[in-house]
Image (tube, rainbow, N blue to C red):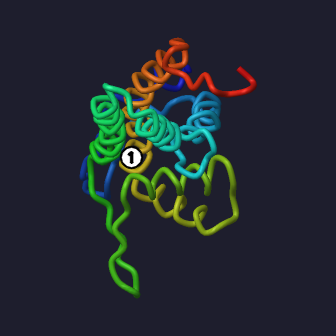
Amino acid sequence: MQFFKEVPAMATQRMKPDGWESEMDEPDDESLRAAITQFRHIYAHNEPHSFQKAMNLLKRSAHEHDGPERDAVIKLLDSHLRAEKEAIRKAAVMGIVFERPTGSEKIDTRTIIDAYFHGHYLHSGNEKSALARELDRHQPWPRYTMYRAMLLLLNVYWPAANAAQRVLDASELLDTDDADG
């Protein structure tokens, strides 16, 4: 997708006498929106075809078939899940904490992605929209974090998809007891 070629490689923020100045080359809005509509199906754990659900399904299948390579396969699949967590952790280049009357609210990478996906790009007029607007007052870091997370996660999801495809391409690894063939 075009968006992944446009992810900014850097962002800067400078203190000026009259306030902060931020700089970042934003990706094209149309390519970003196109990427988000596809990306969320893999990223969001509650989506039927999410990365997490696919990995867990493969792990369950390996466990149930109890083949000679079961432990190695489960270990490999777990490494993909750990890589996803690590990519999300690495995406945040700057910590964001909002001080609220009720206390401090730490804003992590998943919260940023959720606010922009479900409060700005896919939906609007909700609680997440308010958070997205609040995050926008602290640019470039919130959007840079989202863009960076999407790119880092692409680099996790792609090899995992290739591994899953190799299983699908090897008929001897599939359950042949299925009546539908």
Instruction: Examine the image and state in which quarter residue 11 appears.
Output: top left
Count of numbered circles on the image: 1
Secondary element at tag 1: loop
Q: Decide: is 169 above or below 50.
A: above
> Where does label 1 land, which residue?
140
| Residue in view at x 39 percent, y 81 percent | 100
Q: Is residue 177 left or right of residue 116?
A: right
The outermost residue toward the right is 180
Q: Is residue 9 left or right of residue 177?
A: left
- Residue 58 or residue 179, whichever sits in front: 179
- The answer to whether residue 72 is visible is yes
- Residue 43 or residue 98, whichever sits in front: 43
| Residue in view at x 32 percent, y 67 percent | 97
Q: Residues within 10 Å of mark 1 (few under 14, many from 20)?
A: many
Which quadrant does the C terminus fall into? Answer: top right
Q: Decide: is 70 above or below 163.
A: below
